[in-house]
Image (cartoon, grey):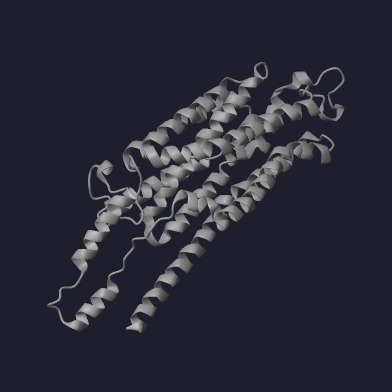
């Protein structure tokens, strides 16, 4: 029992750490761009009288200007565009090649992006483009490989999944740590280099706790008892075949009395479902309407994240202390995602359990 709990909670804790520190660093762009401006990235564009006098002070802070905002916002746009395009391919790789292959590929991309960011500087600012692209593509799909950990928790599956999703949203607080470290004298090169080195703990979940393919759902009763996780049942076809065999074995014999047969038949619950095709899902009105709704929400969020820093500079008349203060406050608000998201999962789990209880009640009342 203790061993089973350990192999359930250990990957969950590691998955939370992975998503909190590497899930989607680009969501903290509003905080990072403040540091990049302080460092002087693309400040050479603010020449020939284009620099904003309000944003320069006695401490010889590099000047800022609209041209600098445009190019930095382009870095954010390219990163977001690559994310939206890379998610589909990450999902395909996850379905066809499994967890381990995708995690190794994501680790390579994430490590490459962090190293590129560590070597970037105001003299070679164009490294921001490949660096942020690799970090974005390598970070977000980690959620795909970790969200299946919720399958290990049965009736609390939705709660665990939303907890992991909330950790992804709160990963932007890493940029707040970089900002606070920068204000304390730690360069962003050292910060990104440290993050690159810390990615080595990804191998623990990749090779020890998570299977090579997938964690199945529904979870077989004997899952986790075999030493080789690669031999686990993780394909829907094999799971359905096993369920058919179990159902045949559980069918009561004709020699039993009628009353016991009736009760046994009612307790045999068939879990097998005919999964719809990909084409039917994509063409369904519900899926189309959901994507429209989600795209609008995503567009609003990304536009806000990309334009927050220029907006704060404008409303504060270039007061760097106020901009820094408001940016820090916003980062703390983003951190709240990990605490708020699980509530939606709790509601889903509660409603699902109530529906199951009502379904069993209807069966017995029908008898």
Tell me which corner region of the image, top left, top right, bottom left or bottom right, holds residue 35. Answer: top right
Side (left or right) of 190 relative to 16:
right
| Residue drawn 44% across the image and 48% down it | 147
| Residue drawn 86% across the image and 17% down it | 48
Asked whether residue 56 is in view, the answer is: yes
| Residue drawn 20% across the image and 80% down it | 260
Side (left or right) of 112 relative to 61:
left
x, y (%) of residue 106? 46, 33
Residue toward you, 77 or 346: 77
Tell me which corner region of the image, top left, top right, bottom left or bottom right, holds residue 308. Answer: top right
The quadrant the C terminus occupies is: bottom left
x, y (%) of residue 29? 65, 36
Asked whether residue 22 is in view, the answer is: no
x, y (%) of residue 151? 38, 53
In the rendered image, the vertical position of residue 108 relative to residue 274, given as above or below: above
Which residue, as the protein is rendered here, is positioned at the far left? 255
Residue toward you, 252 or 309: 252
């Amino acid at each position: 029992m203790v061993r089973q709990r350990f192999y359930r909670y250990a990957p969950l804790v590691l998955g939370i750490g992975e998503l909190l520190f590497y899930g989607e660093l680009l969501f903290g762009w509003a905080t990072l761009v403040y540091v990049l401006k302080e460092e002087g990235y693309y400040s050479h564009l603010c020449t020939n009288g284009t620099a904003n006098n309000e944003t320069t002070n006695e401490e010889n802070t590099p000047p800022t200007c609209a041209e600098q905002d445009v190019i930095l916002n382009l870095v954010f746009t390219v990163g977001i565009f690559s994310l939206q395009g890379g998610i589909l391919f990450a999902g395909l790789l996850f379905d066809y090649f499994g967890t381990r292959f995708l995690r190794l590929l994501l680790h390579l991309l994430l490590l490459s992006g962090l190293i590129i960011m560590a070597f970037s500087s105001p003299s070679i600012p164009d490294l921001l483009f490949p660096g942020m692209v690799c970090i974005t593509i390598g970070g977000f799909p980690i959620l795909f490989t970790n969200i299946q950990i919720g399958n290990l928790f049965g009736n609390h599956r939705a709660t665990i999944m939303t907890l992991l999703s909330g950790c992804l949203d709160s990963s932007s607080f890493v940029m707040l740590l970089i900002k606070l470290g920068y204000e304390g004298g730690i360069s962003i090169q050292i910060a990104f280099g440290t993050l690159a080195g810390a990615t080595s703990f990804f191998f623990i979940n990749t090779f020890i706790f998570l299977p090579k393919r997938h964690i199945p759902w529904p979870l077989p009763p004997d899952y986790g008892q075999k030493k080789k996780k690669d031999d686990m049942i993780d394909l829907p076809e094999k799971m359905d075949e096993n369920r058919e065999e179990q159902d045949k074995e559980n069918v009561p014999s004709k020699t039993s009395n009628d009353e016991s047969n009736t009760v046994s038949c009612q307790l045999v619950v068939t879990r097998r479902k005919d999964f719809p095709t990909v084409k039917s899902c994509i063409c369904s009105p519900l899926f189309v309407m959901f994507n429209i709704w989600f795209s609008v929400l995503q567009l609003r969020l990304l536009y806000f994240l990309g334009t927050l820093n220029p907006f704060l500079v404008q409303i504060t008349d270039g007061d760097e202390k106020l901009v820094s203060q408001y940016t820090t406050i916003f980062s703390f608000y983003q951190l709240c995602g990990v605490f708020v998201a699980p509530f939606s999962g709790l509601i889903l789990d509660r409603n699902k359990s109530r529906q199951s209880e009502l379904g069993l009640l209807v069966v017995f009342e029908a008898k």
